[in-house]
Image: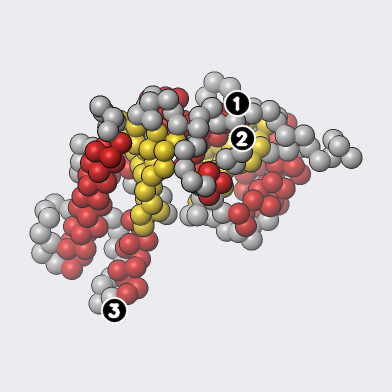
Amino acid sequence: MLLAIDAGNTNVVVAIHDGVEWRGRWRIATRADRTSDEYAVWLLTLMQHVGLKTLDVDRCVIGTVVPAALYNLRRLCRDWFDCEPLIARSILDWGFKIKVDQPQEVGADRLLNALAAHYHYKGPLIVIDFGTATTFDVVDEEGSYLGGVIAPGINLSIEALHRAAARLPRIGIGRPQSAIGRNTVSAMQSGIFWGYVGMIEGIVTRIRNEAEFASMKVVGTGGLAPLLAEGTTMIERIDTDITLEGLRLLAARNPAPISSRETE
């Protein structure tokens, strides 16, 4: 079985695939100083709950945009699953060209999203990931990664409003009943929700015009994708597992790394 680890700025998502389906998906807050043993206590308990053991795992793959978290995640794979993990990097075999100025600077999550989106939905397409940052990634008809857009995430914007304006409260995101807010909270919710819907529609339109493809599908991922899709027809599909799928596909394309212990 494959242990896939997607370490983002906000959460680390861990999942196990048995070759046919995902057997479990678990989430924990990202913390760079969390030790491999702490991860293991958390993960092994959850695995036991669904009838899985460490010996069931024979491959590990990690995608992370938090370099400081990599050491302990790698130790988790080595010490508790006896696997040398494959680390998602631009130098691996992705099956497509990375057509940007500095491929090594592209976040692993963005390449993983591009890989899985093209595999499942074919190109040309745009993947919008509503995470800590809101990213738009562009894939052509051959699956090549063309670049994209990075904007502040919704929760970052909400927190910035609260911190920078003394009288504005911290709010939760939700679809407002109307664009015109009748009080401070509803006005803020309207600005956040419809502001991001407007950003989605504006950026997708500009990308489509600039890329000059006859048509481009739009796939949304991330926890807030279903909510924002309610406000626009631009997002055609929602796929919350797309980054994990990218990890699975990347592991299938690349050989397992040789463990340092095997070379000693």
Q: Which image quadrant: the C terminus?
A: top right
Cα–Cα gap, marks 3 and 1:
52 Å
Establish if 8 lies above or below 142: below
Asked which secondary structure carries label 1, the reply is: helix
Q: Residues within 10 Å of mark 2 (few under 14, many from 20)?
A: some
Residues at badges 1 and 2 in contact (C-beta under 8 Å)? yes
Type of residue at label 2? Leu
Q: Residues within 10 Å of mark 1 (few under 14, many from 20)?
A: few
Residue 89 figure quarter? top right
Q: Which image quadrant: the N terminus?
A: top right
**Which residue matches tag 2?**
92
In the image, which disc is placed on residue 113?
none
Inspect this view and state whether residue 57 appears: no
At x 24%, y 38%, the residue is: 209
Type of residue at label 3? Ala
Asked which secondary structure carries label 2, the reply is: loop
At x 22%, y 47%, the residue is: 202
**Which residue matches tag 3?**
166
Closer to the N terminus: mark 1 or mark 2? Answer: 2
The percent position of residue 30, horizontal first and vertical second, equals: 54, 55
**Which residue matches tag 1?**
253
Type of residue at label 1? Arg
Closer to the N terminus: mark 2 or mark 3? Answer: 2
The percent position of residue 261, horizontal first and vertical second, equals: 84, 40
At x 61%, y 35%, the residue is: 92
